Amino acid sequence: MSRRAERRSRLGPLRWLRLPLAVAMLALAALMLLPPGWFGMGGIAPELLTARLAGARPPLVVDVRTGPEFAAGHIDGALPVPLHTVPFRVGELGAHKGRPVVLVCMSGHRSRVAGLFLRLAGFAEVINLDGGMAAWRAGGLPLAGPPR
């Protein structure tokens, strides 16, 4: 059996997905390069977020990093929703549409992409953590361990 035939048999009916997946990945990469204002959401400094979390109307914190990144340390009470699952979990987050939503990733790029999905889904107040978890850690702010 030739190498080409062997690859075809391994991929089977899924081989037609290669092009759409490649296009989707390129589109996400392009979105990550856009300036923050293009997404129509504001930012919040880590220190201000700690104050808002202690306030009367705390925002929902959604962490869009991968599972291992989240497990290594996250903001207490953050909901883990990895970026690649955001489009499929927008409905699940819909119960929080009336609440401000703060999106968190390592540097602030992936959370901007997630913010676009939430804005398109009708979330009114979507906020990006300025500098992401890197800025949170640099500020010496508290981290929670694995989710309880």
Image (cartoon, rainbow, N blue to C red):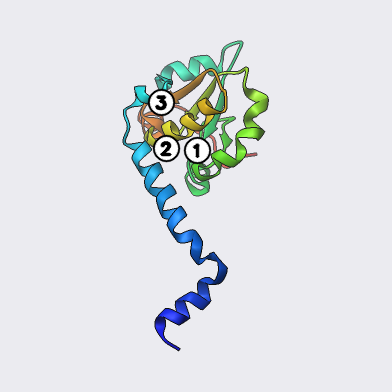
**Quarter of the image with the N terminus in it:** bottom left
- Quick one: label 1, few (<14), some, or many (20+) residues within 10 Å? many
Q: Nearer the viewer, residue 12 or 76?
A: 12
Label 3 neighbour load within 10 Å: few <14, some 14-19, many 20+: some
User: In the rendered image, which quarter is residue 124 located in?
Assistant: top right
The residue positioned 46% from the left and 30% from the top of the image is 116
Residue drawn at x 45%, y 60% is 18
Q: CA distance from mark 2 to mark 1?
A: 7 Å
What residue is shown with label 2? 110
Among the two numbered marks 2 and 3 on one chain, the one whose residue lies closer to the N terminus: 3
The amino acid beneath tag 1 is Val
Disc 2 + disc 1, Cβ < 8 Å: yes
Q: Which residue is mark 1?
A: 64
How far apart in space, not on screen, are marks 1 and 3 (Cα)?
A: 16 Å
Identify which residue, 99 or 12, lies in the foreground.
12
- The front one of 72 and 11 is 11
- Name the residue carrying label 3: 39
Which type of secondary structure does the marked residue at label 1 adopt?
Answer: loop
Of labels 1 and 3, earlier in sequence is 3
Residue in the picture at 44% in, 27% down: 141
Is residue 110 found left or right of 102 in the rendered image?
Answer: left
